[in-house]
Image (cartoon, grey):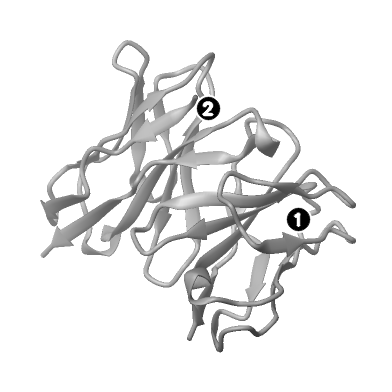
Amino acid sequence: EADIYQTPRYLVIGTGKKITLECSQTMGHDKMYWYQQDPGMELHLIHYSYGVNSTEKGDLSSESTVSRIRTEHFPLTLESARPSHTSQYLCASSEWDRISEQYFGPGTRLTVT
Amino acid sequence: AQSVAQPEDQVNVAEGNPLTVKCTYSVSGNPYLFWYVQYPNRGLQFLLKYITGDNLVKGSYGFEAEFNKSQTSFHLKKPSALVSDSALYFCAVRDLNQGGKLIFGQGTELSVKP
């Protein structure tokens, strides 16, 4: 079992609220990622980080932001939640080299009403 | 652009029978290929990967995958399916851009019946 954690696991929140999804890993990995999994189950990269103070946007247009102040922590924030943000959010991490697998957290299922 | 395709949305197998979940890829350069499994309300679990070398890769839970360069395929296999193998399976290729992100296939729902 990978040592990567996400909280909360489930969240139901009203439109316009600000929320932060937490992700932490204890493996000392430099690279971290956020993927969004839509109801059709496809996964799309929304943010990634090479290490502390590094954040980059992924493929999927997202109104979320991320920060990387500590190696182990990569939170994702939605300033104003909308129903279109309803989805499953998966955090992952990997070692620096290109051949390493990514380890995934259990996910946060977000519902915006 | 790199891409992965899983042509079957669902695969149904009887317990004890062999199973195959198909994956084809399109990449420039050498492919780094992965298989993941997702159980309901869980994250993705790594099964196996192909980087280089032997075309038959063995992974977790008795799964293996065969890399075929001429057919650009990386099919997941298991000699004898278990009911507990029922889950969603994703094939992925590692993109060397964007932090080495994974590009996923659409996923294949495997259902193993007793």
Percent position of residue A57, x then y: 69, 48
Question: Which residue corresponds to the image point at 23% horizontal and 37% vertical from the top-left?
Answer: B7
Residue to which mark 1 is pinned? A27
Q: Nearer the viewer, residue B15 or A40?
A: A40
Q: Would you place residue A98 above or below residue B71 in this image?
A: below
Circle 1: residue type: Met
> Are discs 2 and 1 both within one chain?
no
Q: Viewed as shown, does residue B86 lie left or right of A98?
A: left
Q: Which mark is residue B32?
A: 2
Label 2 crowd bin: few (<14), some (14–19), many (20+), radius 10 Å? many
Mark 2–mark 1 distance (CA, rounded to whole Å):
22 Å
What kind of element bears circle 2?
A: loop
Question: Which residue corresponds to the image point at 37% horizontal and 64% vertical from the top-left?
Answer: A39
Question: Which residue corresponds to the image point at 84% horizontal and 48% vertical from the top-left?
Answer: A54
Q: Chain of mark 1?
A: A
Percent position of residue A59, x then y: 58, 44
Circle 2: residue type: Tyr
Q: Chain of mark 2?
A: B
Q: Quadrant of residue B84?
A: bottom left
Q: Is residue A1 visible?
A: no
Question: Which residue corresponds to the image point at 70% horizontal and 81% vertical from the top-left?
Answer: A18
Q: Which mark is residue A63?
A: none
Label 1 crowd bin: few (<14), some (14–19), many (20+), radius 10 Å? some
Q: Quadrant of residue A19?
A: bottom right
